[in-house]
Structure formats: structure tokens, C-alpha cells
Image (cartoon, grey):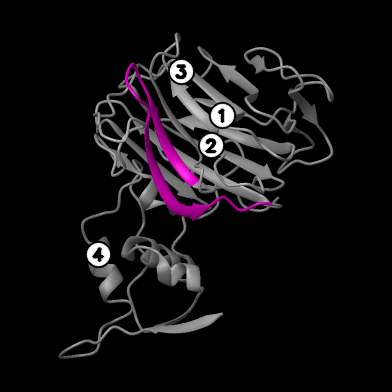
Amino acid sequence: MLRFWVVIVHTGCAAAAVAPAVESPDGSLPPDAMASEVTRRDTAVDVTLADVLRSPADTRTAVDTAGNEAAPPAPPCPGAARFCEGFESFAVGAAPGAPWTRRTEPGNAVAVDDGRFFSGTKAARFTAPAGNFNRAEIKVTTAALPIAGNAFFGRMMVFLTALQPATGVHATLLAASDLRATQMYRYGIATTGTLSANYQHDGPACNQQSRQRLPTGKWACLEWQFDGPGASLRLWLDGIAVTTASVTRFSDDACHDGVSRFEWTAPTFEALTIGWENYQPTTAPTELWIDDLVVDTTRVGCPGKP
């Protein structure tokens, strides 16, 4: 572990301590947030070598994490949320029922499980064997979407036992689409093993790869914002923005034809799909749990430890 000292040099009189910036309901920071950052007192931060190799924005995220800048804990299901799912009402061993529909390939499975959960006594378990194309997903439509303004926030707790040992496997964890799934915004795992945004439409698919890996072997909090009018996607991991997985109108990476840079024009969000779907051969089985899903019109936040 490398230790770095983040030192802010002030001119004139000493700076006073400033309270951490608080996000607005839409997930944005107030105008004085940057001023709060530059007037914070000197802080010692542990930073790994991977943090040093990240972009400046990602390094700032690591500093913010050590400075406890994440939002305060949210309940598993905020009372006024548009849609919540903790899978508590479904029978153990069976796939979640209405309002969910199951989408699985042969050998893949989705079932409610009481052996691992984040809160309550149950979670949804998604399993896929080693092989080529796998799909173990569930989809919800009218109970959660559409939302007026075609923009929404989401949150879910995920537990992935391990990343695939071989590189080159792209997988989806969540997707929002129109009912025909002709266009969709997706978040998942890129072929490099890092979190990635993906855009599906009638042309070559487009990606935006981050430098942040999804933690494995423990529960992690994924939050996202899909903004149709703004043609933008935002992602948070454990309460901290993954800026390199955020997109507004165009991605930094070329689309799958290696040349095009299509605008990420949003669909009408009418369906939300969660689970596991991979598109290249895997060399090991996949095991994933999801719990405490929330869909709302404002940022939800991560739940505290139960």
C-alpha cells in the first residue's frame, strides 16, 4: 500500500473546516461543491497503485471515498419510492413471480434464495454454467416503468462470487429498454473485467468502459441514473460516482464497428431487466445474487449494513 498526502496550500489566512458537499435530489452537486473540495483541511489518504494509474477523476473519487463523502445510508425500501423489490414475498427455490417475468437460456436458472441476502431473509439468485451465450434474468414492466419525463434512478445490492478468470467476456447486469427491446441503456461488466455502460440500438452497439472493477465475494451497491431527455447515463458504486462509466450523448470509446460514434438517443424506458447475460464463452460458472432493488425519480442512496 502506498501512502500519499493530499495537501492543499492556502494563501492568506488559514481556511476553515467545511462540511462535506451534499448532493441534490437529482444526484448533482451544488455550485459550491468544488469550493468545499479545495478548502478541505489536509487529509492523509491510503491510495493503491491502481488508484495512481487511474484518471484524475478516478483518483479524486478514491480520495473522496477515504474522506467519507458517500451519501448517508438509505433504507432498503424508501417509503415513497416508485418501486421496491426485496424478494421477500416469493417462495424459496422458485423464480420470482408477478410482476416479474423470467428470461433464461437452457442450463441457466433464477430462483429466490434464503442462503444469501443483504436484508430481510431472501434475495434473487442467478446462475449460469460455463459456456458461450448465457442468460439468467428477470424483467419488470408496468409495476416500475414508464416514469413521467422518461428519466429515473435505480439502486440494487449485488453479490457476484467471482469475475470470469478469462478476459474477453462482456456481461450485462441491468438494462432499461422499450417494450420491444429495440433500444436500451445497460450497465454491466466489460471484456476487461471493469464496469461498463452499453448502448443498444439499430446500429453497432456502443460502450463506455470504466477503470473500476465490481467487487466480488461481498455485497456491493450499484446505483444508476438513466436520463432520456439528456441522453445520459450515470453510475455509482457503493455511493461513489464511477465517472468513467458515465455518458452524455456520446461515449469516449468508438462503437463496435471501431469507427462510429453514435449519439446515445434514449428509448422510452418501459422495461427493466436485471440478472446475468454474457455474450462470449465463459470458462467458469457464474453465481450472482441481487437484493433491495429500488426505482425512483430521485437518487436513492445505498442502504446501511443490516
What is the C-alpha distance between the residues marked 4 and 1? Answer: 41 Å
Residue density around tag 1, few if under 14, some if 14–19, many if 20 or more, within 10 Å: some
Q: Which residue is mark 4?
A: 34
Q: Judge whether residue 205 is colored magenta.
A: yes
Q: Which residue is mark 1?
A: 279
Q: Which residue is mark 2?
A: 170
Mark 2 or 4, which is nearer the eye? Answer: 2
Q: Nearer the viewer, residue 162 or 110?
A: 162
Residue density around tag 4, few if under 14, some if 14–19, many if 20 or more, within 10 Å: few
Q: Is residue 148 above or below residue 222?
A: above
Q: Are marks 3 and 1 in contact (CB under 8 Å)?
A: no
What is the C-alpha distance between the residues marked 1 and 2? Answer: 6 Å
What is the C-alpha distance between the residues marked 3 and 2? Answer: 26 Å
Residue bounds of the magenta highlight: 195-216
Q: Are marks 3 and 4 in contact (CB under 8 Å)?
A: no
Q: Identify the mark nearer the N-term, 2 or 4.
A: 4
- Rendered-image quadrant of the N terminus: bottom right
Res. 300 in view: no
Residue density around tag 3, few if under 14, some if 14–19, many if 20 or more, within 10 Å: many
> What label does residue 145 carry, if any?
3
Q: Residue at x 25, y 31 (%)?
A: 260
Q: Are marks 1 and 2 in contact (CB under 8 Å)?
A: yes
Q: Is residue 15 above or below residue 160?
A: below
Q: Residue at x 29, y 39 (%)?
A: 251
What is the C-alpha distance between the residues marked 2 and 4? Answer: 35 Å
Q: Quadrant of residue 96?
A: top right
Judged left or right of residue 50, residue 246 is left
Residue type, label 1 = Tyr
